[in-house]
């Protein structure tokens, strides 16, 4: 589970941490200034964090294998199905006039912070992403930024 220790204040859950960081370090903002924009960005972020991510959580994948006896081939096919369905829904949401270089406009925000790791996992499991050109374009734009490069799994020390 993601966690942030901010001077003894232990925070958990990705979206709560991201919004906390946006509130405590507001420059650059991770949410748009206008209410409709914030609602749109939250909807995108929640589609990823609440609809897609729980199905590919390591705990869920281990349950499929250990408790239900699903072999790796079928578990991975199950994973790919759900991540492809979920990312296709995000792709449809991104067909919107306010989508820019990033999920919402031309600066990265909360939705981009959710999208990049989800696409990383989708690629790791061999999901078919060709039908999601906007998703892929946005992830590519994010990956050019230091903040995303430094947060990439390859840059993290091994979890203990």
Image: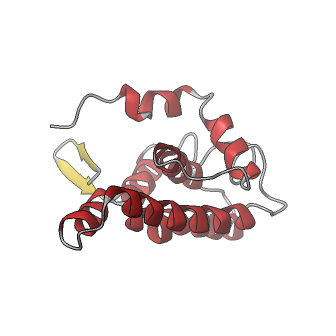
**Nearer to us in this view, 141 or 128:** 128
Rendered position, 104 above or below 34: above
Q: Position of residue 143 (x, y in %)?
A: 59, 32
**Nearer to us in this view, 16 or 28:** 16
Left or right, 95 with reference to 17:
right
**Nearer to us in this view, 65 or 60:** 65
Left or right, 30 with reference to 90:
left
Colouring of the image: secondary structure
Number of numbered discs on residues: 0
View extreme (right): residue: 97
In the picture, the quarter occupied by the C terminus is top left
Q: Position of residue 1 (x, y in %)?
A: 26, 54
- Residue appearing at x 42%, y 59% in the figure: 15
Left or right, 86 with reference to 125:
right
- Residue appearing at x 80%, y 62% in the figure: 95
**Nearer to us in this view, 2 or 107:** 2
Q: Position of residue 109 (x, y in %)?
A: 59, 49
Q: Position of residue 34 (x, y in %)?
A: 69, 64
- Residue appearing at x 51%, y 68% in the figure: 82
- The quadrant where residue 136 appears: top right
- Residue appearing at x 45%, y 70% in the figure: 50
């Amino acid at each position: 589970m993601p966690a942030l220790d901010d001077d003894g204040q232990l925070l958990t859950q990705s979206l709560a941490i991201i919004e906390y960081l946006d509130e405590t370090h507001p420059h650059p903002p991770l949410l748009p200034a206008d209410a409709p924009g914030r609602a749109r960005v939250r909807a995108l972020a929640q589609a990823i964090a609440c609809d897609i991510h729980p199905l590919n959580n390591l705990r869920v994948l281990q349950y499929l294998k250990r408790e239900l006896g699903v072999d790796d081939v079928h578990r991975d096919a199950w994973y790919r199905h759900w991540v492809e369905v979920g990312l296709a829904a995000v792709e449809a949401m991104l067909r919107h006039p306010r989508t820019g270089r990033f999920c919402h406009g031309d600066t990265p925000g909360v939705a981009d912070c959710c999208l990049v790791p989800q696409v990383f996992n989708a690629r790791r499991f061999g999901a078919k992403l060709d039908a999601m050109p906007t998703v892929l374009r946005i992830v590519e734009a994010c990956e050019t930024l230091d903040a995303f490069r430094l947060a990439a799994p390859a840059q993290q020390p091994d979890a203990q």
